[in-house]
Image (spheres, rainbow, N blue to C red):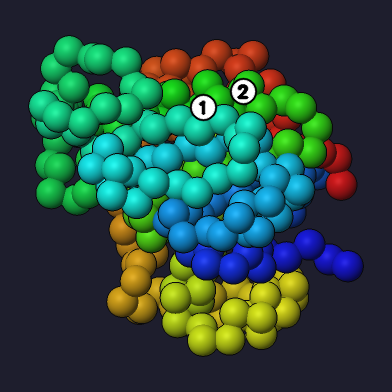
Amino acid sequence: MKPERILNVTNSVNLRELGGYKTHDGRMIQWKKLLRSGDMSRLSNKAAKQLFKYGLNYVIDLRSPFECEMSPDHLPKHVIYRSYPVYPMGDTGSSDLPIVDNEDELYGNDFSEPYATMILSRHSQLAFRMMFAKLLDNAERAKSLLFHCAAGKDRTGVACFLVLSALGIDYQIIRRDYLLTNLVYESVDQSDLRKKLQNDDLMDFINEMNSSFYVQGSSLDKARQALIINYGSVREYMHTAMQLSDKDLSDLQQIYLKRI
């Protein structure tokens, strides 16, 4: 049976597989290695066990400490959990991020766009750097890393853009995955949607959702534009902002990609 893009886990929110996306050089992301999601607080014990059997190994929580406290993740035992809030925390709250001076210092750009802010602010970059460190730690075969926020669309969407870009996935594929959020939130019958998503010819169907209330493709375009304008290329952003060496990037691809 073909793996499903949207995982059938009761009470999950926008829980999706990133396996199967292809690179230009004949590789693709392995299934059961990368997951993205929204809220994880309402999972039953049965659902948590289901994710453990699926191979869940790391969970990266991109929400604020307040969100984490109000709606803590319900996860299987032995899963490694880390809190890396993308937005600045203020004076209260705790997370697994190290303390960084001048965390709100920006780079003289227009940060009216929240997606650009997530790409360029010191605090957000630190959160994403820590996420990449765990991605590199998740080298065991058939063990997956999941990153999530509350709805699984904005913070998770930018995180997914960075992860898939580092793996060499084409931007149009990344953008299409981003817009899948609209299908998830607008579909009453999730089982029917999962069947439809097993068809590889869905570009037009997904593009129709670009005008949806939930996410706009133009938002992710602005994140990419902010990255290119300020760093010149994805690779330079990975080197400078994410502090990933060429070997790190190669290791990431070795961990998460396989030859088709």
Q: Which residue is outermost to the front?
A: 45
Q: Residue at x 53, y 38 (%)?
A: 59
- Residue beneath label 1, please? 132
**2 and 1 marks in contact (CB < 8 Å):** yes
In this rendering, the answer to whether 28 lies above or below 8 is above
Q: Which residue is drawn at 68% across and 51% down?
A: 49
Q: Is mark 2 on a helix, strand or loop?
A: helix
Residue 171 position in % (x across, y down):
53, 51
Q: Which of 71 and 28 is in front in this view?
A: 71
* Residue 168 can be seen in this image: no
Residue 79 position in % (x across, y down):
61, 35
Residue 78 position in % (x across, y down):
63, 32
The quadrant where residue 225 appears = top left
Q: What crowding class fits label 2: few (fewer than 14 Cα within 10 Å), some (14-19), or many (20 or more)? A: some
Q: Which of 110 and 131 is in front in this view?
A: 131
Q: Which residue is drawn at 58% across and 86% down?
A: 189
Q: Which residue is drawn at 45% across and 47% down?
A: 73
How many numbered marks, from 0 up?
A: 2
Callout 1, which amino acid? Phe
Q: In the rendered view of the protein, which quadrant contains the N terminus?
A: bottom right
In this rendering, the answer to whether 12 lies above or below 167 is below
User: In the displayed structure, does residue 208 sit left or right of residue 93?
Assistant: right
Residue 136 badge: 2
